[in-house]
Amino acid sequence: MRLALFGTLWSRRDDGTVVASVENRSALDDLEWVGIEPDEMAAPANDKRVAEVVDELIDQGRAYRCYCSATELREMSVNPTGFPEPVFYDGRCRKLTAADRAAMEKMGRKPRIRIVMPEELPTLDGIDMPRPKSDFVIVEADGTPNDLFSAVLSPREAGATAMLVDGGRVRELAHWLVIAHVLDWELPDLRVLPPWRAVDTAQANETPTTLTIAALRDAGFVSVALLRAAAEAGWDPGDATDIDEMAARFSIDDLSPDSPIFDYDALKKMNGDLIRKMDRFDKIQVVGEYLERKGYPFMERDPAWQERFVETVTAELDTLADAEAWASILLTSTVDYDREVARTVRNPTTHALIDTFETAMDEVIEGDEADSRTWRRVLSRYRSSATAPGRALSVMRLVLTGQREGPNLTGILTLLGPDGCRGRLEKARRYIA
């Protein structure tokens, strides 16, 4: 996401055209959700064009057909971890004669295309890259270019003038430089974006490489929070919250050369703060859309209740997933008790506490509405009148929600309302009977 964001800002600031070469529609949809959209889609090089380029390279002695089997490859030296190809290729197929190749093809072997490593390897100022040391594959046996070849061929065919490269792919970058050199392509303005790193080892499973936009959206993060977090990871966006505002102040030279720290907890805090700063309508919209996606009938409730719900839950949430804890209690037709909770609900002491609670409601609440202050008075009177005051609130939480812990009881009661509360008390009574 950072790569797409800063690449877009770079292009927008220089009045350029953002060309996307990603064919993954879901990835483009995720970027669009956070406000990052390309101007054009680069068409992948078709089979005919790939074949033309490959034939030219072979004719020039810059590439050759490799017929090695998987078994033969396993006999070769192993490349260091992280290299695009697992083996250090020994170049044996580079020496095949036309007769040798014909014999291989008669045996049914289909060749892959390997690039011939140039004697002098191209470099990139300021970038320390592990250098490829053996001929590597650029086209697979079925004739399709691999990711290494496509990463250079597609932008070359599109006439790219600037490229931002993920610093986490420096091993691949070294191979891209070789391919560009062999293709006689003068590289465009090329910059490397330092990769994100986790704040500590405890967050090894919570890094941008594992938390995709789709995963973070599903976890309850809002688009503006992800956009801001990506922008702040190596650059100062000021108060800007959208692409146009960010582009107006962006300079590619302002990007930090250091790897930014990814702090999941800080991202959650930012997310919660941004949700609370939204206006009333936007808050209802983002909470409602999230809960509907999770299967809760939020939009079926009347607008006044929706507003009360959102104002109650957003006061203490970090992500929209926190609202789901409330929805699981309030946006269901009834409450379910597991075996252990049911045992508590059946206890005669619980029956007495239900009666005490309903009496407190009758004494405090007038009419069919009650705000949070009224419910706090109900809880206070209930607890002071209960025969077991130490267990009073925890038992009532079990009766009303079926859960031993969760959202605050006052908020639950406010959103249930007197009628909803009495309905759940009545169910508990029937359960006891």
Image: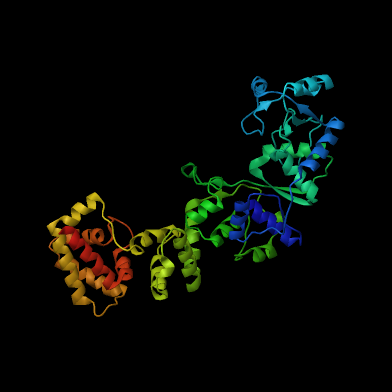
Q: Is residue 168 above or below residue 109?
A: below
> Picture coordinates of residue 195 (x, y %)?
62, 46
Q: Quick check: 179 left or right of 418?
A: right
Q: Residue at x 15, y 55 (%)?
A: 347
Residue 91 visible, this orientation: no
Number of callouts: 0
Q: Position of residue 17 (x, y in %)?
A: 75, 58
Horizontally, residue 398 falls left or right of residue 185, namely left
Left or right, 10 with reference to 240: right
Residue reaching furthest right?
60
Image quadrant assignment for residue 306: bottom left
Quadrant of res 352: bottom left
Residue 27, compared with residue 415, is above or below; it is: above
Q: Please, which colouring scheme is shown?
A: rainbow
Using the image as rendered, state which of residue 323 and residue 7 is in the foreground: 323
Residue 280 in sight:
yes
Q: Is residue 262 left or right of residue 99?
A: left
Q: Which residue is drawn at the image coordinates 21% and 73% (left, top)?
A: 361
Q: Residue at x 23, y 53 (%)?
A: 341
Image spot of residue 143 (x, y percent):
74, 36
Query: In front here: 132 or 428?
Result: 428
| 114 vs 426: above or below | above
What x and y, as percent, mark residue 263? Answer: 51, 51
Instruction: Report which quarter residue 45 is drawn in.
Output: top right
